[in-house]
Image: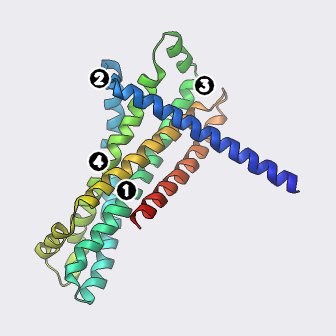
Amino acid sequence: MIGSIVQQIGRWTIDHARLYSGTAGILHEAAASAVRFDFMNRAVFTVLIRQLYFTSVQAIPVIFASALILGSITVNYLLSILTGFGAYNQVGNYLLGTMLHEIAPIVTIVILLLRSGTAVVSETALMKINGEIDALRLMDVSITRYIFLPRILAFLISGPSLAIFFSIIGLIGSFFILGYLHDITFDNYLDQLLLAININDVAVVVLKPVIMGVAVAGISIRSGMSVQGSFTEVPVMLIRGMIQSLIIITLIEAVFTFVKL
């Protein structure tokens, strides 16, 4: 009984160590490729634009709807409490802290994981199974430059861009849905936001999605490249990649929370 538990723990540890070490290797190679400006290559740049379109542009409707729904709930809830106590001067601090530090980065990355992360896992897995990866290597085409780099850069750019978009819609757009229920005008509401925002808020809403997005991209690529040659492995790696991505998102969030404290 004890031996079986120890064996399972050991297998779990080894699998995770391989995944994270492989992910770190992929990210290191992609970073070296980015430093050499390999993304400026015409073929690589074309792939990057396509990845950005799928990851960012096509995600805008989902981000917009999520921001309005979650933003309306957040704005309505906090305004109910703060205006009830007459704490108008704290409206900006609480709303910005909640939206920019927590809701916008987390929701944005989870949406990217569900939309683009799953697509990256499936795409890279199928490319490997169909022999496309081996064909590129035989033609001496860099897998890092052509496959890894555009997808990682797409997540790196899309994460903070969509998080900022989410924050704007969540904070300003949501006010027009439920804000009129409270004893506060839009001008006063906007003034409180502008007075409360600082460089730390901007840094968090940019830096957190960048780190989380790059981590999710690396894990998704690594999960897809882990298949051996069977189509039945694709859903297994897809689920495993999503779980590992959620774990790393949680760990990064914990680090940010600890540092802030």
Residue type, numbered disc 4: Ser
The residue under label 2 is 40
Q: Are marks 2 and 3 in contact (CB under 8 Å)?
A: no
Q: Residue at x 86, y 56 (%)?
A: 2
Q: Are marks 4 and 2 in contact (CB under 8 Å)?
A: no
Residue type, numbered disc 2: Met
Q: Residue at x 52, y 37 (%)?
A: 24
Callout 4 environment at 10 Å: few (<14), some (14 to 19), or many (20+)? Answer: some
Residue type, numbered disc 3: Ile
- Alpha carbon of mark 2 to alpha carbon of mark 3: how far? 28 Å
Between tags 3 and 1, which lies in front?
1
- Alpha carbon of mark 4 to alpha carbon of mark 2: how far? 21 Å
The residue under label 1 is 105
Compare marks 3 and 1 and give the one earlier in the sequence: 1
Q: Report helix, strand or loop for mark 4.
A: helix
Depicted 127 relative to depicted 254: above or below: above
The residue under label 4 is 161
Residue at the bottom extreme of this rendering? 85
